Image (cartoon, grey):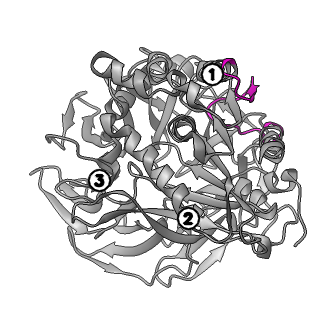
Amino acid sequence: MPTYDFERYLNVRSARVPTFGPNGELAFLLNTTGVPQVWRLDEPGEWPQQLTFEEEEVSFADWSPERDELVFGMDQGGDERTQLFRLDADGETVTPLTDMPEAIHHWGEWNSDGSRFAFTSNRRDESVFDVYVQGRDECGDDAEMVYEGDGWLTVAGWSPEGNRLAVTEMHSSFDYDVYVLDLATGDLDCVTPHGGDVRYQSVNWGPDGDALYLRTDEGADTMYLARLDLETGALETVASGGEWNVESVTVDEDTGRFVFGRNVDGYTDLTVGELTGETEFETFPTPDLPKAVTGTGVFDRDAERVAFGVTGSAENTNVSVVDVESGETERWTDAATAGLPKESFVEPELVRYETFDDDESGERREIPAFFSVPEDATPGETPVIVDIHGGPESQRRPTFHPVKQYFLNRGYAYFEPNVRGSTGYGTAYTHLDDVEKRMDSVRDIAEGVEWLHDRPEIDPERVVAFGGSYGGFMVLAALTEYPDLWAAGVDVVGIANFVTFLENTGDWRREHREAEYGSLADDREFLESISPTNNVENIRAPLLVLHGANDPRVPVGEAEQIAETAAEQGVPVEKLIFEDEGHGFTKLENRIEAYTTVADFLGKHV
């Protein structure tokens, strides 16, 4: 099979995050220019029209329900201080709506006639988010603060009559509340009072405004679709996820049509239906989509069609539109694969390997993972990259990953475990790595490497630890805790010391991260004990560290201190910092430099 350079893979395009216009046109994000911008299609398969021409990444776009205009969001250099802009549908005029570069703005939703929109922002106090309503013609200071918050608030949507907002508050990754804000009185009423950790997410108004449809794990290990009666507070199940999570929900408040997705072993299983009662519904034919991962569905104006971003391990992301009643599906976009033949992309095998302890049933616990092997792998001589996801409340799923496909093309195998603490396998599984159990998840990685040693293709002397964000911590912890297993490590925007990370992360994030990792007040000694910078003398493998200087989540000091302390111990270390990036790399030229550096580093040491 021919080989291709990294630039080709990083030029594979993706079209995602669709939004329907009032006349059935479609806007979406496409990264043809090197960073995602807003593009438009009026019919499937047409040549798309580019609407934004910014140097920075556009993070979302949302079409007005009544006018030929959109709102889009953009930060500067990855600092995540998103500003909102109004864009005419012809792409000729961009109007700043917030223009407060020191503050974060989380988009909420347009009201029903597109005259106003709602959002939350920390412009008053960096550590909390307030609720604002603003007219489409207003900007900057014109926004009206309709509720002063004391936590992490997000607007979920306007009520059908337009006089109330549904608002969610994140207490931690596993604890969310829902409120209803009366815009006339300013009263914010909690409609999900509960004890312990319960998630109420993906909130949608019901057709009559008397209920909310959402997904929750109240009283269950997995997320299910439920109806919350706003008068009685009763929570009733609409559809169970079974052993799997309902991961997305969209309800059209005018028609009662809905779509929800279940995360089944990482793949999306879609259900499209229409409410026939408060919790009763009829289903339409299953959308004619391949086995893949889909984003949240978006209905058109009449709820006759629903659009998704669709991706698979061997399929780059494109937007497909489904006819609700028939299930017939048409792909609207054709994001280019940079001339790479699709048949060269490798599909993974879904595997499970035994780890060191037993599960709740007394059986040896199994860890799910995706394992990919090059077609022409030589037995006993194939190096393998162990790619560890971030979060940790995340999940490695079978989505298109150009870095993975490059390395498979160059003869590496690829192993992507969902160790304890990952989402997608029930609430109990996600809590198996909390605080003092943190290093059990690192041991899961080591057990995965032992499983790889028994695979006939793999060279046990050429195993690479690779990961970003929390996955970067896992790389560093794996190198310090199990130094004999690794030929090299690649840490991308990773946590090197939990104490300095928690001290320096964004004010709005600290409380939520402490709920997962442990608090500076109560767990400092433990956090110090497991921090890779304090165990760096154990590292034996060469280390590559990459980071963005503007990272508000994991400050760049984490990269600097691990590179410095490891080098002092005689570890071969390379460090690369991007001055115009944040928590990850979005600009094409930076991605090419970053991952070409990774390839050269592994070529040298592995």
Q: Which residue is mark 1?
A: 556
Magenta stretch holds residue 254: no
Q: Is residue 189 above or below residue 346?
A: above
Q: Which residue is mark 3?
A: 427
Q: Position of residue 142 (x, y in %)?
A: 50, 20
Badge 3 or badge 2: first in the primary sequence: 2
Q: Is residue 143 above or below residue 372?
A: above
Q: The residue under label 3 is which amino acid type?
A: Thr
Left or right: 414 in relation to 33? left
User: Residue drawn 80% across and 46% down?
Assistant: 599
Q: Which residue is mark 2?
A: 370
The foreground one among 401 and 434 is: 434
Magenta stretch holds residue 584: yes
Query: What range is drawn magenta here?
Result: 568-591
Residue 22 found in image quarter: bottom right
Left or right: 440 in relation to 226? right
Asked if the residue under mark 1 is in contact with the one under mark 2, i.e. CB atoms within 8 Å, the reply is no
Q: Position of residue 20 (x, y in %)?
A: 58, 59
Dot 2 surroundings within 10 Å: few (below 14), some, or many (20 or more)?
many
Residue 4 visible in the displayed image: yes
The foreground one among 236 and 52 is: 236
Q: Is residue 335 above or below residue 56?
A: below
